Amino acid sequence: MKPLRRKWARVSLVLHYLGWGLFVVVSLIFGELLERDFNISTFGVGMLGVGMVLMGPVLWRLTARCPHCGKRGGPLSWVYLKAYCSRCGHVLPFDDGPIHEEETPLNQRPRYRLKRGWARLSLAVLIAGLACLAAGGLVFELLMPRPQNEEELWNAIETIWAVRDIAAYTFLAGLVLLIASDVLTRRRLKCRVCGRGLAAPWQRRRETRWCGRCGAALVFEDELEYEKT
Ligand SMILES: [Zn+2]
Ligand SMILES: [Zn+2]
């Protein structure tokens, strides 16, 4: 059985948080200084930060696979913590963890029902956020004038600033929505058995996912059942 590698979990986490740091510190706090004194594009550095924020979890998905069912990704942590696969519910083996961890049989685990309305809302906000990120990128790519000489540059300078602002604000709105979706998921789709694991907003009706931290079964209430109560 091939264990998940702690090394990749750490690289993903570093990439993710370094990206956030880069984005916040460089583009919001020292942005003007960078542009004026070092002639470094704040927009470029901000985008690099956002790219790294997204690359972290992508890298983890590419490098980590559940040896039982092949699901990619899984709980990310810096040091070993007992973690369960959300799809098959078995304990995930890590290269720095115990060789054999005890686990409760799947049918004896506690079941917890979550309200589906919150999942829908969180998913809608997530999709809106991703759409804003894509729209910001597209505006920048498609509408940005590309002046060939100095005269053209001066004629286009106002358009350049306007396009840059629209792209940056759309992008920022996208990030705010992604954070809102994350906060909503963490507050409303939390496993009540252990208070740490989370259900996924994109989890389908009647589909069971296993809490990554305690292995409890997380299911959404059926629509009809929900209306009845
Ligand atoms: Zn699995
Ligand atoms: Zn749990």
Image: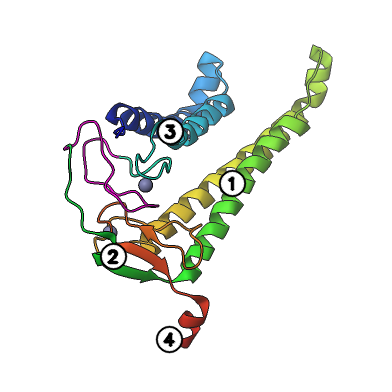
The stretch of residues the image draws in magenta is: 77-98
| Residue 57 belongs to the span the image colors magenta | no
Residue at image mark 4: 229
Pointers 1 and 4 in contact (CB under 8 A)? no
Question: Which mark is first along the chain, 3 or 1?
Answer: 3
Question: Which mark is first along the chain, 1 or 2?
Answer: 2
Q: Which kind of residue does numbered mark 2 sit on? A: Asn
Question: Which mark is first along the chain, 4 or 1?
Answer: 1
Q: What is the spatial separation of the Cα atoms under label 2 and label 1, in whole angstroms?
A: 37 Å
Q: Residue 56 carries which label?
A: 3
Position of 117 with respect to 110 (left or right) is right
Give the structural element (helix, strand or loop) at label 2. Answer: helix
Instruction: Reply above or below: 212 against 207.
Output: above
| Residue 94 belongs to the span the image colors magenta | yes
Who's the residue at 78% across and 19% down the image? 153
Q: What is the spatial separation of the Cα atoms under label 4 and label 3, in whole angstroms?
A: 41 Å
- Seen from the viewer's position, the closer of residues 32 and 82 is 82
Location of the N terminus by quadrant is top left
